[in-house]
Amino acid sequence: MTTQQNIPASQNDAWGFFGTMNDTAAAAWPIAMTAISDATYQPLESVRLFLDSRHGRHFADDVLNEMLRGHTIQQAIDAAVTRWMGWTIGRKTSKDYGIPKGLPYLTGFVIHCEVTDESFEAEAA
């Protein structure tokens, strides 16, 4: 079970998921972190990297669209997770990002953000 203390804070509160969610960001962050980690079986730090990225901004747009339909934050995040897990990586996205074709979209981009971050750290060393 994940507790609030285990959830890494955003390192990009002006952009990505946190910045896009505006006034609801503080409430939405731990819900999104947990829901994405549970759905993708990826560690919270990988999910943080995803949510702090431009892909996290797009995920937040999807959540906000659900909230505009009258859903609560939890319902909106659950709907976005379900949608993103239902999409699969196609040939073009696989070629552009190096994510295996057929992988659930959300899983693929969470892993991609982790690998990309690690590669930047390796280049900086």
Image (cartoon, helix red, strand yellow):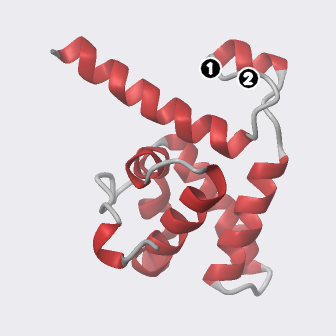
Query: Can you say which quadrant of the picture contains the C terminus?
Result: top left
Check disc 1 and report the residue beneath it: 97
Q: Residues within 10 Å of mark 1 (few under 14, many from 20)?
A: few
**What amino acid is labelled 1 in the image?**
Tyr
The percent position of residue 77, horizontal first and vertical second, equals 65, 70
Nearer to us in this view, 2 or 17: 2
Residue at figure coordinates x 63%, y 50% from the top left: 40
- Tell me how far mark 2 sits from mark 1, CA to CA: 6 Å
- Contact, CB < 8 Å: mark 2 with mark 1? yes
Left or right: 48 as drawn, with respect to 80 = left
The percent position of residue 95, horizontal first and vertical second, equals 71, 12
Residue at figure coordinates x 63%, y 81% from the top left: 74
Q: Secondary structure at mark 2?
A: helix
Check disc 2 and report the residue beneath it: 93
**What amino acid is labelled 2 in the image?**
Thr
- When asked about the image quadrant of residue 103, the answer is top right
